[in-house]
Image (cartoon, coloured by chain):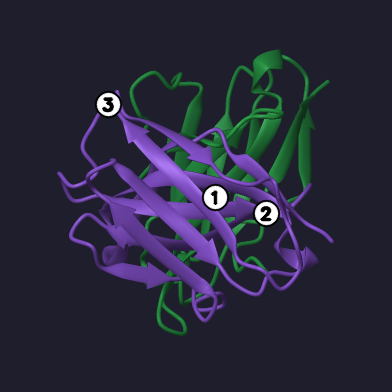
Chain colours: A green, B purple
Amino acid sequence: QSVLTQPPSVSGAPGQRVTISCTGSSSNIGAGYDVHWYQQLPGTAPKLLIYGNSNRPSGVPDRFSGSKSGTSASLAITGLQAEDEADYYCQSYDSSLSGSCVFGTGTKVTVL
Amino acid sequence: QVQLQESGPGLVKPSQTLSLTCTVSGGSISSGGYYWSWIRQHPGKGLEWIGYIYYSGSTYYNPSLKSRVTISVDTSKNQFSLKLSSVTAADTAVYYCARGGPDFWSGFFWFDPWGQGTLVTVSS
């Protein structure tokens, strides 16, 4: 069971801005641990989209941006495009038990 | 450019041991401070981290799975492997290998790149 909660789905028209939240707790995001984001296109492996809360790897369009505040993080997609239709996952570290890498529940982005 | 490729049986019987191998190309598995990791995704569900083997050979597993997981490395073949014992239908998933870094314990840690994934079904 995931300890990071995301909305199951978000949608928007082409060109619009959508945001995906990732809500954690005091043992993960709230403890100051970084949040990273992945995009999973249908039938493919996840791909790193944002690392260290707000950094984009080389090749990732600047339409994607990340932020973190308190016990939550957000991924924003501006100028939504049809090719952005995918599942998105956040990931962080959780210090409970012995410590573990944890993923969010995932959000399906639909381009209307 | 580092690439990873999973291989292994696509069908495993209940109570047996699931065994997968990840072959790394484009870079040496024993160089650099990377955490060679396994992650799985149950059908239609989210991602679950299984564990890693550090380039030095040390391992760390998801506490929820650690009693059944073993990750090992064969540097001569530039491969690392996953063994998951006593499998049940709940272990049916797509299994991914990925390179993790740079620092697991600080949380400044992500996975890039990933293998394409391999579906393992547990069924008699």
Quadrant for the N terminus of chain B, please: top left
Mark 3 belongs to which amino acid?
Answer: Gly
Residue occupying image coordinates x 70% and y 52%: B93
Mark 3 sits on what residue? B26
Q: How many marks?
A: 3
x and y percentages locating residue A51 in the rendered image: 38, 42
For residue B57, side relative to residue B46 (left or right): left
A15 versus A8 height, above or below? above
Quadrant for the C terminus of chain B, please: bottom right
Residue occupying image coordinates x 63% and y 47%: B9
Q: Are marks 1 and 2 on the same chain?
A: yes
Residues at marks 1 and 3, CA–CA distance in whole angstroms: 27 Å
Mark 2 sits on what residue? A6
**Residue A100's image quarter?**
bottom left
Mark 1 sits on what residue? A90
For residue B5, side relative to residue B93 (left or right): left
Regarding residue A4, the answer to whether it shows in the image is: yes
Q: Chain of mark 2?
A: A
Residues at circles 1 and 2 in contact by the CB criterion of under 8 Å: yes
B61 versus B18 height, above or below? below
x and y percentages locating residue B83 in the rendered image: 51, 63
x and y percentages locating residue A43 in the rendered image: 70, 29
**Residue B68's image quarter?**
bottom right
Mark 2 belongs to which amino acid?
Answer: Gln
Q: Report the front residue among B100 and A37.
A: B100
Regarding residue A53, the answer to whether it shows in the image is: no
Q: Indicate the secondary structure of the residue bearing disc 3.
A: loop
Q: Report the front residue among A52 and B90.
A: B90
